[in-house]
Amino acid sequence: MGIKLPDDIPSSEITPKEQYLSRRKFLIGSGVAGLSLGSGALLLGRGKSSAEQAQPLTGTRKSKWTVESLGGDKLNTKSEITTYNNFYEFGTSKEDPAENAGSLRTRPWTVKIDGEVEKPQTLDIERILKLAPLEERVYRFRCVEAWSMVVPWLGYSFKELASLVKPTSRAKYVAFTTLKDPKQMPGQATRVLDWPYVEGLRIDEAMHELCLLCLGLYGEVLPNQNGAPVRIIVPWKYGFKSIKSLVRISFVETQPDTSWNKTNPREYGFYSNVNPEVDHPRWTQATERRLGELRRRRTLPFNGYADQVASLYAGLDLKRNF
Ligand SMILES: Nc1nc2c(c(=O)[nH]1)N[C@H]1C(S)=C(S)[C@@H](COP(=O)(O)O)O[C@H]1N2
Ligand SMILES: [Mo]
């Protein structure tokens, strides 16, 4: 997002287009010898293509978060959701993750859960898939770059996982970490971000029912480009809080570092609640463009989830704590 631009503001409005393009080329060129973000096909190796990896998830149930509950919003198509992604581990443009994420191996996969918990443990992904019934939750998703989508995610509340490890009273925040393996994640050969990607939530945010441990979408396991095999979805916050391909979850006493805040603290705060009244320094957050539409929509406070989550922030100045 240092080099990202809001979806429909031409790069020329912010920085001369030539400069933007050459900056991007520079970032791509800074990969290690033999690796290039532009040649995803070569990196696929033994990885599976997105078509091959689509596996149905069985035994899933509907939840109260249906498309009807969103009042007139339509689902985005699977193709929209899986070909327009942000996953800088696989390149910085929206098409890169779908092209390059075939090199991510999602089996075997474990997630280490540690820190201020009574029962620290390392969980296998197969166990995580069975920890609680998988629900379909249709959520609005709003990227900080002012595009949005409506997605039928599959998963269960993060609090189900937390109850297994029993956080102690000292746990005030949750710190999340993505896999770091430049062999599988060619974007990690560049220094566009400090790797691994890290995110964090206050414990009460993480334990909120809406906060989803996400394992699939559209009835199938998560496509690699959407953060397989397991990610977080926090629907009332900007998309970058919804960290992908998790390998570690730590319950901690103090506010953890987060990737975009470290990279540019003036532009990306720890909270990052969707707030149409607090503009990004380089663009408005009052409106957004839904993938597949041309018109702009008004952005809703907390992305439309104010009734559920506004009370978490009672007494907090949301302009200062952006
Ligand atoms: N590890 C990791 N997680 C990440 C990102 C990333 O680059 N790396 N991008 C974030 C951003 S900016 C957005 S908008 C969402 C995009 O999720 P999607 O590709 O499933 O739409 O993932 C978030 N999670
Ligand atoms: Mo984003």
Image (spheres, rainbow, N blue to C red):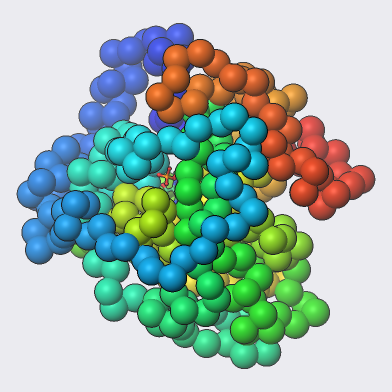
Q: Is residue 73 above or below residue 134?
A: above
Residue 212 pos. (x, y %) = 58, 59
* Point 47% across, 79% down: residue: 130
Residue 123 visible in the shown view: yes
Q: Is residue 105 left or right of residue 310?
A: left
Residue 116 lies, with reference to residue 242, above or below; the image says below
Give x and y (percent) for residue 138.
Answer: 54, 47
- Of the 4 image quadrants, the one containing the C terminus is top right
- Farthest residue toward the right? 315
Q: Which residue is painted at 51% across and 63% down in the image?
A: 61
Give the quarter of the image for residue 291. Answer: top left
Give the residue displayed 29% in from the left and 29% down from the top. Answer: 24
Count the labels in the image: 0
Percent of width and height locating residue 275: 71, 32
Q: Which of the 4 image quarters holds residue 209?
A: bottom right
- As drawn, which residue projects farthest toward the bottom? 119
Q: Does 28 sit left or right of 253 as displayed?
A: left
**Whether residue 259 is situated above or below residue 203 in the rendered picture:** above
Residue 160, relative to residue 11: is it above or below?
Answer: below
Residue at 55% x, 76% y is 132
Does residue 201 appear in this view?
Answer: no
Q: In front here: 202 or 196?
A: 202
Residue 129 rendering spot, x and y as whole percentages = 44, 74
